Amino acid sequence: MPVTVELTGVRFGYGAEPILDGVDLDLSAGEFAVLAGANGSGKSTLLKLCVGLLRPADGSVTVLGGSPLDPAIRRRIGYAPQGLRMATSLPVSVTEVVAAGLTPSKGLLRRMDRRDWSKVNAALESVGLGDLSAECLFELSGGQQQRAILARALVADPDILLLDEPTTGIDQRLRPALAQELRRRADAGATVVAVSHDPDDFHQECDRILVIEDGRVRQITHEEFHTHLALGGGGSR
């Protein structure tokens, strides 16, 4: 399968000390990878570099053969950040927020059709929000808002899915279905990267487990993942 995400010698830091210090990483179409690491290790930072929200201090990030800053490439990426808590008085429904995920591929002027609404409904069901679709987003809990943002990332069937702690706010009984949905997306050719600190969420469905340590990314086994968690791995940045 073709390489869809390539990081070469990537360095990045928020201060004098680098967080990512020479990261080399290739991800392919059809691959489902879980990304782990201790608090502040750079997991969220790595996703932001891949989606073009941050630029490396050194090295290169290539996504789908080009720059993630290219609008034509960015619209092919589904991104769900962690801990996004919205607060506004705008009466935006959950359905409207998720449907907005189709705008980059459809354009602002094209009207939603039956197929589009079917995608919205399927995305809502995949995160357990089908019964809250008509609710105002900003009246929901933080976890429910997070699930809506996840559904927005899923709805357009992007070529790349970058998900930061996607099980946040999702009940334990719904997590296996989400993992299976992400596996289905990968089997259909998407590249899926999920930051996670809980091996029970994805370990039966993912292809690779990656961990960031000392500014570098390396692949680990499921057993090493459990050991990593027991030593305090997880968190964001």
Image (cartoon, helix red, strand yellow):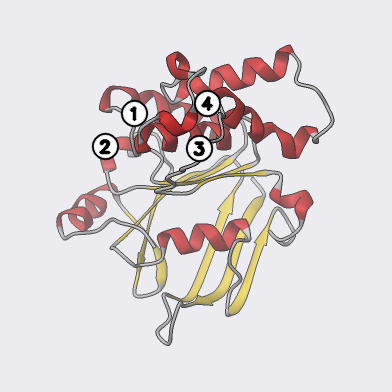
Q: Residues within 10 Å of mark 3 (few under 14, many from 20)?
A: many
Residue 100, how many percent across, how many down?
65, 33
Whole-angstrom CA distance, mark 4 to mark 3, is 9 Å
Q: Earlier in the sequence, mark 4 or mark 3?
A: 4
- Inspect the image, locate mark 2, and give the three-letter code of the amino acid beneath it: Asp
In front here: 72 or 107?
Answer: 107
Q: Which residue is mark 4?
A: 94
Image depth: mark 4 or mark 2 in front: 4
> Do residues under tags 4 and 2 come within 8 Å of each other at their CB atoms?
no
Q: Is residue 110 left or right of residue 94?
A: right
Q: Is residue 164 above or below residue 173?
A: below
- Inspect the image, locate mark 3, and give the three-letter code of the amino acid beneath it: Ile
Say what secondary structure mark 1 lies in. helix
Dot label at residue 175: 1
> Do residues under tags 4 and 3 come within 8 Å of each other at their CB atoms?
no
- Inspect the image, locate mark 4, and give the three-letter code of the amino acid beneath it: Val
Image depth: mark 1 or mark 4 in front: 4
Q: Which residue is mark 2?
A: 200
